[in-house]
Image: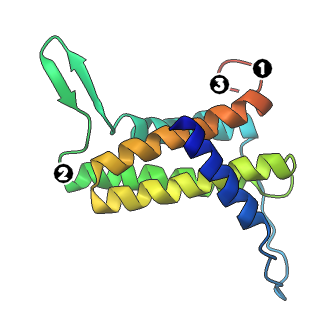
Amino acid sequence: MLRTAICGLTVYLALSACTPAPESSEPATPFRPVLDDHQLMNWVMDPMADVIWGSAGSVITEAGEQDLAPVDDAGWAEVRNAAAAIAESGNLLMLPGRSQGADWNEFSAGIVTMGERAMAAAQAQDADALFEIGGQLYNVCVACHQIYMLEEDGEG
């Protein structure tokens, strides 16, 4: 299943790259990144991914099995918000000055896609879909980290 998910993501991203970018007559909007990549991942992306991962599946404790899915609209809204932050963080990673090339952008686009899918699962309050998407998000993160992971530990 892991191989299927990675292959599917690879095909999707390869086909997405074939679409020409629309031409824009608007002047470029100035932007000023506040965080470096390491901080963006540690302070924004990782905590938001933890919300998704902590809201999917179940754990077994001495008291029995505990379902981690949100139990009310507020809980699902928290997951949706985290997924939105993940999706937009993927876009941030592709900004000029942050992007580290085509492979980096493919992984970042995968993060955007997983964030969008997690938002949809949260909107539908679909715990099973969220669990699957959480696993796919993890796979994209791990694949990218195997190539680009910063060697430093800590908060950045």
Residue type at mark 3?
Glu
Residue under label 2, please give it: 72
- Residue sitting nearer the eye, 24 or 28: 24
Residue under label 3, please give it: 155
Look at 66% across and 41% down and name the residue there: 40
Look at 86% across and 52% down and name the residue there: 97
Disc tally is: 3
Residue type at mark 1?
Glu
Q: CA distance from mark 1 to mark 2?
A: 39 Å
Q: Viewed as shown, does residue 68 lie left or right of 90? A: left
Whole-percent x and y of residue 9?
A: 63, 51
Q: Quadrant of residue 77?
A: bottom left
* Residue 149 appears in the picture as rendered: no
- Residue sitting nearer the eye, 44 or 106: 106
Q: Quadrant of the C terminus?
A: top right
Of labels 1 and 2, earlier in sequence is: 2
Residue type at mark 2?
Asp
Whole-percent x and y of residue 99?
A: 83, 50
Q: Are marks 3 and 1 in contact (CB under 8 Å)?
A: no
Mark 2 surroundings: few (<14), some (14-19) or many (≥20) residues within 10 A: few
Look at 29% across and 54% down and name the residue there: 126
Q: Quadrant of residue 152?
A: top right
* Residue 35 appears in the picture as rendered: yes
Q: Are marks 1 and 2 in contact (CB under 8 Å)?
A: no
Residue under label 1, please give it: 151
Mark 1 surroundings: few (<14), some (14-19) or many (≥20) residues within 10 A: few
